[in-house]
Amino acid sequence: MMDGMERRIYLDHAATTPTDPRVVSAMLPYLTTAWGNASSIYAEARAARKGLDDARRTVAGVFGSKPNEVVFTSGGTEADNLAIRGVALARRGRGDQIITTAIEHHAVLHSCEALAKEGMRVTYLPVDGEGSVDLDALRAALDDRTLLVSVMYANNEVGTIEPIAEVARIVHGHDPRIPVHTDAVQAAGALDLDVDALGVDLLSVAAHKLYGPKGVGALYVRGRTPFLPQTVGGSQERNRRAGTENVAAAVGLATALRLAYEERDARRPRVAAMRDRLLDELPRRVPGTIVTGPRDRGRRLPNSASFAFENVEGEAVLLQLDLQGVAASSGSACTTASLEPSHVLVALGVPERYLRGSLRLTLGHENSMDDVDSLLDVLPRAVEKIRALAPA
Ligand SMILES: Cc1ncc(COP(=O)(O)O)c(C=O)c1O
């Protein structure tokens, strides 16, 4: 799979994906010939401006939004920060509460924690044992000082798809002025992003999760949503994010999104079949394994299989798999380096003896059933070896 290396099996597409060569080709002209500053007025700038405008229209097409409701960002993290800070601070005069869930990505959680230090109240909604947000808790939490609600579309560690349209209905039924944000970074490419069907006011995506380049994402901001820019110093992105536009990156995001939705239906059954084989077989082959996340596969991302092993250190499993040529993850790339158990698994109520033994396998369309079989072959021995070396 990777040039110059032994055969590698990459099963960590939730961390990032290889860049599609067609995306690279679409970006190249904006790095070589059409390199002008998209905000200037002369001929050199116009080709860049056209590339940026076309990219914005393409992204808006996927969101079912107006192009001017799309703000390009440096990725999912910035889109999440911008959504939460941008709206909560703009609406500050109306209240002090932000409602989110216990299982968000740290890009959302840390944004909320920072605002808590600035005097806001943050309510973390609980989830059930499969990761679905508690809608009764949402109803109970909403009050007349709620500034913003942020619930992720799909979870990055256990693949749970959240009922976003229902969340938006509940929030807007309480008060139509309260903006609803969804972090769709993991959902993008797999699930519909039509912002009107979802009923959301803000939505974050990142290109590198869907075969686009790293370092670019987008935030959808519904027209008239109160919004305070968090980067100042220029009028780019309609005053919502200052700084010379990264046209090549925006074109990369737009191309990756377009291809993901054009090819989704053709690719999905194969990817879901690989996921299902992992979910069915892995617990059979490795004693003391539970599946984490939804049992109902319709409520799980089609490419995501997640597990936890009893009394095994997940990091040790990952190292063994790496030695055998397999790239996998214990959960989110961001928590890999920390020794804390995953906040997501804790929120799901996963029993203590499983908490350090998580494994996330996320598939891509370049994987094959042979990759799955190889994993199913090497994993039981890897876990057995670790259990023998370090009995818990
Ligand atoms: C759900 C979720 N939100 C946000 C992010 C952050 O996106 P980025 O890596 O583009 O900053 C990630 C990436 O892991 C994610 O999975």
Image (cartoon, helix red, strand yellow):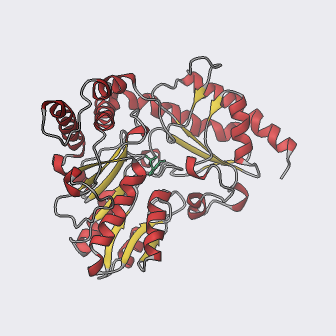
Q: Residue at x 28, y 37 (%)?
A: 247
Tell me: residue 80, above or below residue 315.
below
Horizontal side of 194 relative to 125 (left or right) equals left
Q: Residue 46: which quarter of the image?
A: top left
Q: Residue at x 61, y 57 (%)?
A: 342
Asked if residue 320 shows in the view, the reply is: yes
Q: Residue 327: which quarter of the image?
A: top right
Asked if residue 286 shows in the view, the reply is: no
Q: Nearer the viewer, residue 137 or 330?
A: 330
Horizontal side of 65 relative to 380 (left or right) equals left
Q: Residue at x 44, y 44 (%)?
A: 301
Q: Nearer the viewer, residue 79 or 347?
A: 79
Instruction: From the top left corner, tell me how far across and down residue 347 is, in percent.
Output: 56, 64
For the N terminus, the quadrant is top right
Q: Across the whole image, how many numbered discs are drawn on residues? A: 0
Instruction: From the top left corner, tell me how far across and down residue 95 is, in percent.
Output: 31, 81
Q: Nearer the viewer, residue 157 or 254?
A: 254
Tell me: residue 125, above or below residue 275.
below
Q: Residue at x 39, y 59 (%)?
A: 81
